[in-house]
Image (cartoon, grey):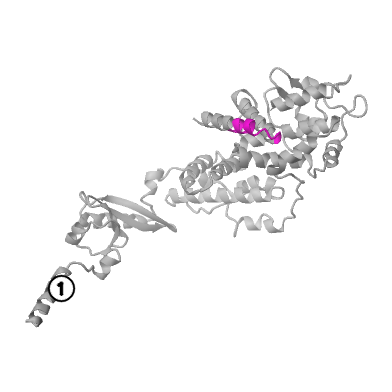
Amino acid sequence: MLRARKKALGKSRTAGNAAAPLSKQASKGVLPANAKAIAACTEMRKWKITGVPGLYLQVNSPTQRSWLLRYRFCGVNREKGLGSLKEVGLTEARNRVAAIRAEIAQGRDPLAAAIVTPLEVRTFREAAEDFIKRKEPEWKDPKSVLAWKGTLSTHAYPQIGARPCSEITTAEILAVLQPIWKTKTETAKRVQGRIRDVLAAEFVLSQRRWRDWHNPATWDGNLKHLLPAPSKIRKTEHYAAVNWRDAPAAFAKIASATGSGALALRFTVMTAARTKMTRLAQWHEIDHDEMTWSVPPERMLEAGEAVLSGTKGNTVLVPLSSAVAAILVEAQQMKRVDDFIFPGAKIAKPLSENTLLMAARRQGVNATVHGWRSTFSTWSKEWLGGDLEETEVALGHIIPGVRGDYMRGELLAHRRLMMEAWAAFLLRTRDEAEQARIAYRTFTLTMAR
């Protein structure tokens, strides 16, 4: 009797668990190429279909199931949808996979047609802008977009922006890189790599139809033989600068000093100007109504830099913050018969070249005037979230292709917000600095719309 009960119990357990175990293939996410098995599959995951390379059944829910083809093209893994299971059966899915495999065998990417017309050859600028849009989601730092746009706008677009990608030559790439290869080596390397990536992507999108094409921006076997190795280029000595986080404390030391040189140094730091710009600054260049400073072009030239075009001939307009206006009020007390805002020791003579540097050192600040410009640039990028091109314009750098609007109208007002934020940051007026930062960013978003 007892044996009979145990035997019956064993049979009932076996019957209850008969459907529980999955096959070895199913437990690994693999389904047989069988219409019934596929129709019965409702577990949410991607199921690999045996016998059809790359074919998957993607189950998002019991009622949302679709076909997916995974394949590799030009070293890049891709996925293409083939339709829902309701509309596309197993046989039709096989046929679609076969058709796509045939396209790939002929060197055509099925996804490329949806992105760009097969035979279309775009200009480098068009290709670069499209490349940035497509790659932006994978860049964790939003500043990467600004960096890409800034370096290409500054260095690449003026030379090759309007050129068809398939026709760009190594000689043209050299024309882009050589002017900055020795002086701005890190920037030049980034520009070279970005041009290379844009052209490589465009070649893939063209479905590899450019005859006898090689990437003119590659390093190995190409530019390596035409440019000095970056690691061998003698490093340029950098100007001593203050870390932007320490700038308020350093500026407080400068502000505690008196005299024409100390006042000129405060003015220079707050306007992110060059020493030469301030030393030779004259009262007739100040527009007290508009609160701008018109700097003549010859005063912008240093170390062979080009002149930045403004709105009054070739003068450069510098917006003046309210803090700088207060400095000018102090300077008026020292006004003499000559027109210099910061007079030198002798009548009709400007300050000497080393006056500003010595004024900083006497206060224990070991930073050059040029170093303060570097501090401003880093602060704009890391604290303010400033536009790269606009920061360059604020520093008086030449930006090929940048509109003259940066020098006037709304964009001049935008730069003024930047300088108001910089002055408030230096003076440790946190509330005003934060308000200026918010105003600047709000203005930036408004212009972008």
Q: Is residue 278 left or right of residue 37?
A: right
**Residue 289: image location, x then y, percent:** 70, 17
Q: Is residue 380 magenta?
A: no
Q: Is residue 15 visible?
A: yes
Residue 197: percent from the left, percent from the top? 53, 50
Q: Is residue 343 above or below residue 10?
A: above
Q: Which quarter of the figure has residue 17?
A: bottom left
At numbered mark 1, what does the secondary structure look like: helix, strand or loop?
helix
Q: Estimate the x, y position of residue 138 in percent, counting from the top left.
A: 48, 49
Residue drawn at the location 62% of the way across and 55% of the way down = 223
- Picture quarter with the N terminus: bottom left
- Few, some or many C-alpha atoms within 10 Å of disc 1 (few <14, some 14-19, many ≥20)? few
Say left or right for 7 vs 397: left
User: Of 240 and 245, which appears nearest the observer?
Assistant: 245
Residue lying farthest to the left in this orientation = 1
- Which residue reaches farthest right? 346
Magenta stretch bounds: 426-437
